[in-house]
Amino acid sequence: MPSSLIRRGVWAIGLAVLIITLAVAALPLIASTRIVRDRIAWELSAWSGFRVTIDGSPRIEVWPKFRAILSDVTLSQWTETDAPPVVEADRVEVDLSAMAALQGNVAFSTARLVRPTIRVQRMASGFYLPPLPTGGRITRSIDTARGVVTANPQKPDLGKLPSDPFGTVEFRDGRVVTSVDGKDAEVLSSLNGQVNWEAMNSEASLTATGIWRGESVQLDFSSTKPLVLFAGGAAPVTLSFKAAPATFSFDGTASMSDNAYLDGQAKFAAPSLRRVLEWSQAGIAPGAAIGAVSIASKVNASAGRAKFENTTVTLNNNPGMGALDFSFAEGSPVIAGTLAFDTLDLRSFLSAFTPVAPTGEAGPGDIDTSFADRINLDLRLSAAHATVGPIQLADVAATAQVKNGLAVFDISDASAFNGNIQSSLRFDRKPEGRQVEMRLLASDVDTGAFATAAGMTRLVPAGTGTVSIILKGPGKAWNSILENADGSFSATFGPGTLNGLDLPAFLKRNQQGGFFALDDVANGSLPIDGAEIKASISKGVARLDKAEINSQKYKIWLSGIASYVGRGLALSGGVVPNGQPAQQPQANGQAASPAPAPPSQSLFFVGGNWSAPFISPIAPGVSGQ
């Protein structure tokens, strides 16, 4: 190769290097003269659709990236000049194209918002969203895509979608606020994340972290057809929300049209439902709500209604299956459906929806039924096995209903104590105040086991029997329900034994005179043919209308009052040989007066309290022999 050609090549390369060096060195000068503040603001406005103002002078950096650093940037709506900015940022970093800058243009692919404040407002749907821009490339692209979707809603022509570039938007240390009484109230703080959307017709994703109501949260969203989604068409969507109190995910199809809907698989999990209720500020008293809960379901939601099919629910590691229906009526959520469990803790389940006394809490406290004004609930429950405190149930069929100040929980059928149980708990708001009604019917149950579970261990016939309890009264506080309730108690017992009573020793001590503790004659049992008890309950006091125990030789009767609140006793009674009429109590229900008794009848008075009763003879009677 001739030396002249070599020299010319070297000169050409050197000249190119010199031109590039001069161009790079001139970039800050060019940027300071041609890429001026107004030009950048105009380009950002054309891109976003908001009116962009930059109060600070832009600073240009060449290395390691060619970028503009803008300070005191605001994005506002064009039509509302008096409204506060939609977005305010202490600093915005824009990655610029060097070639476009040399040509006097502004082109950028990435924008970083440092310490932005984003203002949102509550929409009719209940969600908080920022105001939408009235123009800009993004809005025009969505309008064009809307026409494509309208032309063929089922299968829009994706080739006709706009392909305008979007780029990446990052945000650091931001916050989201909304207006409350004319002042900014913080909704979300420590906001960090980014939006990746290379072109309007490509897929997009959003990743964001922040602090909401004192908890760190993370949101991930992606769609392969975001422009179709924003234009009102149906598009694939994946959504994930993670926080310490709860996690939620959705994978399926969504539409943001006037007839918006979701159709796909949803999952929800929380280590404590009580914590979720408190954190969500739903206004529902959580009580001693369920611990861990998880739900996985096929969901179809539209127009304020969501159907959950093939739903798997796990409560405290107890799995169940069923279907649920969520909707809104007069602004209140409505939940209806059926759930079937293998095992279920009914007390903790109920405390999530009704003001059942918190488990393990000492103080009775007030009853909060305000939840009944905020939610409508109609659930049908079944469980192969269930517990209510220490009570074991089987083959349970139950309902839970909450509506307009009324909360009702019914066990329509359940097996327990070798018999059948039916019960009802009802909270009802009346003009005269809150009323509570409790009903229990235990049919053909093992009365010994039933009494032990109820905490009654003294002089309860062991055998098979039926027990009915009805209580109704004002329910302002838990400690006032039993004190003020009215109702009835009845029980019938078949053949069995009356444990805790040595009748011969009892008759002997009663004949000797002088009061004695029932414990002194408790080492024995009495075979019985049956027993019957009927009592009227008023203001926490049970008045025995009838109480008779029949054995082969004797009949034992009682009359008087027993307080189930203070647990005090004031009873009179007698032991009568079979075939002889028992002395009847006075008509007013008080203990019988110590009138002269037939020679064969042993009369006595029972005082003290349920845990330590004492006996005082009234008249000598038969011997126990």
Image: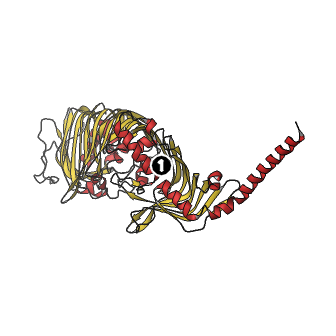
Q: Is residue 436 left or right of residue 279?
A: left
Task: Name the residue furthest left.
Answer: 587
Residue drawn at (36%, 47%) of the image: 352
Location of residue 352 with respect to 34 vertically, above or below = above
Q: Position of residue 605 (x, y in %)?
A: 22, 51
Q: Position of residue 130 (x, y in %)?
A: 42, 56
Q: Is residue 526 left or right of residue 601?
A: right
Type of amino acid under label 1: Pro
Image quadrant where residue 147 sits: top left
Whether residue 391 is visible to the viewer of this picture, yes or no, is no
Location of residue 605 with respect to 424 vertically, above or below = below
To which residue does mark 1 refer?
245
Q: Nearer the viewer, residue 85 or 359?
A: 85
Q: Secondary structure at mark 1?
A: loop
Q: Nearer the viewer, residue 171 or 10?
A: 10
Whether residue 230 is visible to the viewer of this picture, yes or no, is yes
Image quadrant where residue 148 sits: top left
Count of number-bearing discs: 1
Location of residue 298 with respect to 221 vertically, above or below = above
Q: Nearer the viewer, residue 394 or 540?
A: 394
Q: Position of residue 162 (x, y in %)?
A: 46, 43
| Display colour scheme | secondary structure
Residue drawn at (46%, 50%) of the image: 138
Task: Name the residue furthest right.
Answer: 3
- Look at the image and tell me in which quarter the C terminus lies: top left
Q: Is residue 599 left or right of residue 273?
A: left
Q: Residues within 10 Å of mark 1 (few under 14, many from 20)?
A: many
Q: Nearer the viewer, residue 398 or 478?
A: 398
- Look at the image and tell me in which quarter the N terminus lies: top right
